[in-house]
Structure formats: C-alpha cells, structure tokens
Image (cartoon, rainbow, N blue to C red):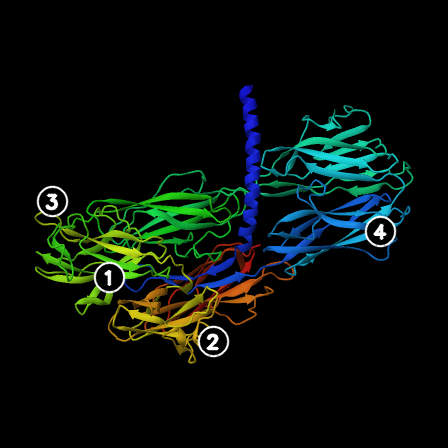
Amino acid sequence: MNIIKTFIRFRRQAIFLIQLVVAVFMIQQASFAASTQQIISNMAVGEYSEEGSTVVQVSRSNLVQTTVLPVYSVNLTANNIKNVLAGQKVYFNHTLSNTGNDTDQYNFTVSNNTGNNYNLNDFSVFLDQNHDGIPDGIPITSYSLSAGESVGLIVVATVPANATVGQKGALSLNISSSKQAIGTTTNIDTSTVTNQSALLIRKKFSQSLVANGDIVTVRLDYQNLSNTATGIVTLTDTLDPSLEYQSSNGENWNGLALSSSVGSNPAGINYRVNSNVVTAVLDRIAANSSGYIEFKVKVNKTSAGIVNNTLNVQYDHDNNSATANISDVSNTASLNIAPIYAVKMNGNSNDSGNSNNVTAQPITQGGVLSFTNYIWNTGNITDRFNLTVAQSNLPVGSQIDFYRIDGVTPLLDSNGDGIPDTGELLSGSYLPVIVKVRLPSDYTVTADSTFNINLQAQSLGDTTKKSIVTDQGTLRATTTSQLVDLVNSPENNGLGNGNVDNVGYAWKTLETTTSVDAVAGSQIVFPLTVKHTGIGTEYLLSANATNDFTHLALPIGIQAIHFYIAQNNGCDRLGAEIGKTRYLNDGESQLVCAVVTVNPSNQNNITTPIYFRVLSPSFVSGNNTSNPSQDILKNAITIRSLNAVSQVEMMPSSRGQVSPLGTVIYNHTLINNTDIDLTGNYSFILNDDQNTFKSTLFYDVNGNGVFDAGDIVVRSISDLPKGKLAAHQRINLLLQVKNVVGNNISQTNSSMVKLTNLANNEILASITDVTVVNSIQLKLTKQQARDFDCNGSADEPYTTNSLTIGKQNNGEGQCVLYKISLTNTGSTNLEKPFTFRDMTPAYTVLFQQPSCIACSRTTAPEVGQSGAITGTLNRVVANQSYDLNFGVRYVGQ
C-alpha cells in the first residue's frame, strides 16, 4: 500500500513538472513556429544507359523552389444572449483563434450598439487562459497568437441600475489584426433585463494540460444571481468523443454522492448519463444561491490538440410553465493534449522501436553502399525532421546522399535551413529514405574494413529530440605492396620509407586563417613528391588525422583535403584533381599538390597534425621493411580563427554533359544575406581543371534562367548593375562552359567559381560544376508556373525562378504546374530508354496527372495523393526536346 501511495505521489509531482516544462516549451514553440517557412523544393532526375553499357547514369535538373506566403486569418466566437439583472455585472465568453499560418497581433475594442434600450457600462476584455469562465488578471487591449493557437476572452460589463424589465442592451467585441487577417472579427453580446431569476453557469476541468489516459474532474458551477428562485433547471453536458465518462468515481452534487442509476440520487436532482451525455435536472435553484456538480472523465486521445466542451442549460426563470424557458450556454472549457515530439530512425518498416544496425551488401573498390532507413514520427503531433551525418569513420572524400524511396529522387529542404528533411510527417507515420554512400574510387584497404555511418534525424518541433541509426558497410580488401618514398617538396624532408615524423614532430607546418565562406573555407597547399622504386605501379593518395589509416577521419579544424596535379613543376597553379598518381616506372617520381581546406566554423586558434599516405593498389608483401607498399608523412597546419559567419550564398553546384565542341549553361543563384550592400574589390575567380574547357560567367539580366543575348559578362561585383550586390538581394548567374576540342569523349571537367575578396584572398562563396564530355548530350531542365485557381492552366509564363504561393479564396491551397524538359543537344540519338523521375514535393499532393506526348508510359499517384511520377521515352533523338508536365496542389497549413 505504501508503494502505491508513493507511486501516486510521484506521478502527481511528475505531471506537475511535465505541465510546467510543456508550458515553457509551448512558448518556445510559438517562436519557432512563427519563424519556420514552408518551402516547396523540387528537382527532377532522369535515368538512362548508353549504347553498349549497362551502367545506369543519372541526370539532375535544376532546383525550383516555391515559398508559401503567410496566410493571416482569424476566427472569433461566439455571439452571446444573456438574461441579466439591473445594476449587476454580466460575463460574455468568447474564443479567439489564429486560423492562419503565421503569428499575428490582435487589438480589442468594445462598443455599445445603437438602437437598444440602454448602454452597458464599465466594459473590459479579460483573458480566460485556463478556460474556466473566470476573468484572469487585469483587463487587456491586445494579444498575440501563433499559428493554430486559441485563447479564451471574457467581456465583463455592468448593467445600468435604472434599466427596466424587458429592456435590451448590446455590445460589439471587435478584433483588428495587425496583419489584416480575414475571418470572423466581430461578436455581438446582447443582455435582456429580468426581474425573475438569472443564472450564471460555468464549466471547467481540474487541469488544463493532460495526456492520453489521464482522469480529469469536470466541474459544472451554477449561481442564481437574483432574489427569485427558479423552477426546473436542466443542465446538459454533451462530452466530446475523446472523453470517456467514469461512472461510480466520485460523482457528487454539492458534496452529496451521485449515481447515474435511476432512483439512486438525493432529493432535488435527477442525474443520468446516456451515450456520453450527462444530464442533471434540478427541481429548483434557490434565490441568491450557488452550487456545483462534479464527475470524472478519462482522456482517450493520443494526438496533440485541444478538446473543447460547453455546458448547456435550460431553466424556468419565473416558475411559470406557460412561459418559455431560458436557454444559455457556459464558457468553453478546454483540455490541451500536450504535444509530444519524438523520433526514431531505424532500418525497420514494421517496428518503430527497432534499434538494430542496418547492414549493406559488401562492396569492392569504387562501389556504393546503399541503406534503407526509416524515419518514424513517434510523437503525437505532425512534425518534420532534418537528416544529417552525426559521425562516421568513412574515408576522406566519401559522399553521402539522401534519396526518396525510388533511390534516385533527392531528399530536399522544406524549411529553408539548407538541410535535407522529411517534410511533414503525421504522428505514427514513417518515411523511407535511401542512403547512398560512395567511397572514393581510389580508396582501397589491405583487409576487409567495416565503416560505421551514424545518421541522425532531428525534430524541428523540438530540436532536442534526436535519433541515430548506425549504417554499416564493408569494403573488400585489395592486396597491395610496393617500394615508395613520400617527402615534402622542395624541402625533401621525410626522406626514406617509414620515416614518418621528425622525432615525433611534424616535418612541415604551414599557417592559414579561417574563411567567411561556409562552403569553401580557407585553403593551403602542401607540395608532395612521390618517389618510386621497382616494378611500375600507381599510388593512391589519402590523408588522415592520425597515422592509423585503418580508421580514417579528417584532422580537427579541417573541412576537406584534395589532391591535384602540379603544373609547371610547382603548386602555384593546380591541374586536375586526382586520387592517385600516374603509373610510375622504376626510379620515377611525381609532384602532387595536397590542398587542405579549413573549416570556417573553427572558433579557436589550433595547430593540428595531418598525415599523408601513398599506397600501391597493385602489389602486396608480408615484409614491409623490404618491399613496403606504402609510406606515411606527418605534416601540420596552424589555423588562425576569424570566427566569421557565412553571409553570402552561391548555389547550387551542378552536373551536366556536353558533346565534343559543345556548350552547356548552368544556372546559379547569388544571395546577399546581410543588411549591408556588398561593394568593393570582390571578384569571381573561375578555374577549369581541364584545359580543353573554357568557362565564362554571365549576369542573367532578365532573371529568366536562360542565356540571352542581353546577358552581360561578370568578372567582379562591380560589373553588376549599380556596381554592387544590394542588401538581401538575390540574382541569377549563368556559367557558360564550352568544350573547345573535338576528341575528348568521356573527359570530366570541374569548373569552380569563387567569389573572392581580393584584399585578403578570403573566399566568400563558391560553386563547382562538373561537366562530362559525351557523344550524347542530354540536358534536363525543370520550370514551374502558378495556377492560382487550380483550373489546370498556367496563369503566368513558366520559369526556373523562385515563386510564392498561398491559398485561394475558398481556403484551398493554390496549385503549381511543373514542366520537365529533356533536350538532346548532341548529334547522336540515344537508342535506349530514358526515364523521367520526380516526386510530389513536401506540403503538396498531385493535382494534375502527368502528360508526356512522346512517352510510352507514365506513372503517378492518384489525384489528391502524394508519391512518385515517372515517364519513359523509348529513344531520345538528336536535337530534339521532350516535355513531361504535371501539377501539384499546396495542402500545408
């Protein structure tokens, strides 16, 4: 028994603490909800194989985005009609609800209506925060609500003492929104003077914040304000379906036990319960008296939200059955099912509690690990979840991508924070995500190696709620060995195989500072010479935080390390990026350039070691002293932190194809996120890593995302209109990449554009476009147009630019029409199938089925549902274009 009492006491204390925490959290949530955008991001992909190849290639379109406009709407309920006594106060109950999708501020005004018998006096507006019908605190004149929130209001006024029986007075409560919200903004409260009985009734719950399964006491209060007793009074409480009446559990009338059984109640009351309707018939309520009825209900609702209930009353105010009874309604009492934010990320589509690791099929060098993960919304409220890599032991240069269930459509960002997320997930539902991990093609191991990738799903409703799943994949061993010496150049220190460090110290230490560019970071170069002896081989290049290369990790403070071909016998000018040396014959050597990029988020000045390694993929030896296959060299880098934050964005990096002697155009966006104009000595530095390509950057004058004759070449910020990038300005840039030779099929070129402050060589932002030379040149473009009234026709020209949408006058979301265009700009037909692939974006459902004249078939979800859209072309003719069209409707808040 003592244990039970202790448990009950502990539970009550726990509930109190939960209520306190959730109340504070709800305030924080209001701020979060107010600042969270809904962004409809979409990117189409295409799949195809070239003639004679079984390799499936993937082409991505440009990214198109539509930002949902704030919708401001409000609802004020309800009109009141009260019987009152002259000279007494009267209470009119209302509920104010923000039915829009953004925070709004409301101002209150109360005024007497004209055309009535008397004016009410001393009127004020009070909050009723706990919804018990009793004014809280001092009078208010305004209040702010976040999207979806509601609050109780009470208008308190005084009836003039000289008002006579039958006279009427009326007030108007008017709400004005700071954002000009539409909706019901006025209620009219009417009072009629009587010299008979006048009742005041209220309803309340014993607690406001509850969880599923809680037992809550309901109290119905009544008061006769007059000097006249009533006749029969009938109280009717129709409980919400989520409230389950608890019989024989403390029901009482003014402390006297009640029962729903016939004939089992005290004299003066007939109390009964039928199908969740509680009815109490009182013989009379004495003059100037009050009373109450209490009973208990069980909360039977798992999802978060508000449960509202009111009490209805009919009473014989004059003890005369020949006259009509008076009808009235209490305040709206509310229970708040507290939001619970929770998430589980695992590898099981049947069990949200499963925590087993997810294991991929083993791969060999250059392969791709593929995992199927599931993000479960285990909370009780709709939420969305950011997906990130919490930790991994992957080798440097590994690439992790998140895809929809089809494995080809990228998972995109739906709230503008730059992180891929699930979009909105209903409570209890899950989203399957395909995770692909591409190891560097030059990376090998001498023994089978298992990699752990800890992926994290983080709630956006409550960022403290996270879940991590461990994906495991194995890289099969490649046996390796050869004789090699890795040294710094031109210093030539570290000479001799196995001579890793300088008596524990680094052979060479360079210094740099962090950058304001969150993408590129500051960079510094280590020239390294690889010397080979013996049978010809090539050497794989890698770097690590320690000399134990069985566990790879970036050194502290380092964002990336890449290797490049040295040009003109030095690293002042970089050639193509490489992952390995060329084949070296006996006695040959090669100079390579290790480019180290510093993490711009570094907060402290640090010196961190960097270990470089060369490893032969061709030979193996059990005796590394006589014929070693690798050599390791210890250097270091000192980082001076500028503690800077990225303020300029350039996006996105793209991939495309070009035919020999062909040209491709990449569309990019440059954004100034600051309140200050960007002017001065800022230049766009362009670099192609293949000399068979030439890139030129243009300002898209008309912003249509297409290269036109009027577009101008830009080499610096001063070339832009007015010589600046204005505060918060967003412009389109077009990178034109030309292949200038006719015999370089399959060659890959990386075009890098860096916006650089020439005063200190800091890189503010950068993008890299990768172009592959192909005899078949396929270009995939996606455009969008708004269909405001959802009649199936675009109400404006199609564009690649960002758009905004909202809701129609009927309250339904507006529609967006998409056009995906495939163009074969090459001179060779693609004689194998090409498949368009797309998905309905976050916050949308299919509105218009896909149409594609040349497609042999299309697939899509039903109208009103979300899912994958495909269209298949049996062949793609040279110099021809093909379109796939479909439409979606916005169904967010």
Could you say which disc has been placed on residue 394 in the image?
none
Vertically, is 569 above or below 93?
below
Task: State whether residue 65 appears in this view.
Answer: yes
With 20 as the anchor, is 440 left or right in this view? left
Looking at marks 3 and 4 on the same chain, the residue that comes earlier in the sequence is marked by 4
Tag of residue 525: 1
Which one is in front, 672 or 860? 672
Residue behind mark 2: 702
The residues bearing labels 3 and 4 have C-alpha atoms spaced at a distance of 102 Å
Q: 769 and 416: which one is in front?
A: 416
CB atoms of marks 2 and 1 within 8 Å: no
Query: Which residue is found at the position 41% from the left and 69% from the top?
Result: 667
Q: Residues within 10 Å of mark 1 (few under 14, many from 20)?
A: some
Nearer to us: label 3 or label 4: 4
Residue type pointed to by label 3: Gly
Label 2 and label 1: CA atoms lie apart by 40 Å
Of the numbered discs in the image, which one, if any, rests on residue 169?
A: 4
Pick whichever of labels 2 and 4 is earlier in the sequence. Answer: 4
**Residue 830 appears in the rendering:** no
Labels 1 and 4: the sequence-earlier one: 4
> Does the CB distance between marks 3 and 4 fall below 8 Å?
no
Mark in the foreground, 2 or 4: 4
Residue pointed to by mark 3: 622
The amino acid marked with disc number 2 is Asn
Precedes in sequence: disc 3 or disc 2: 3
Q: Amino acid at mark 4?
A: Gly
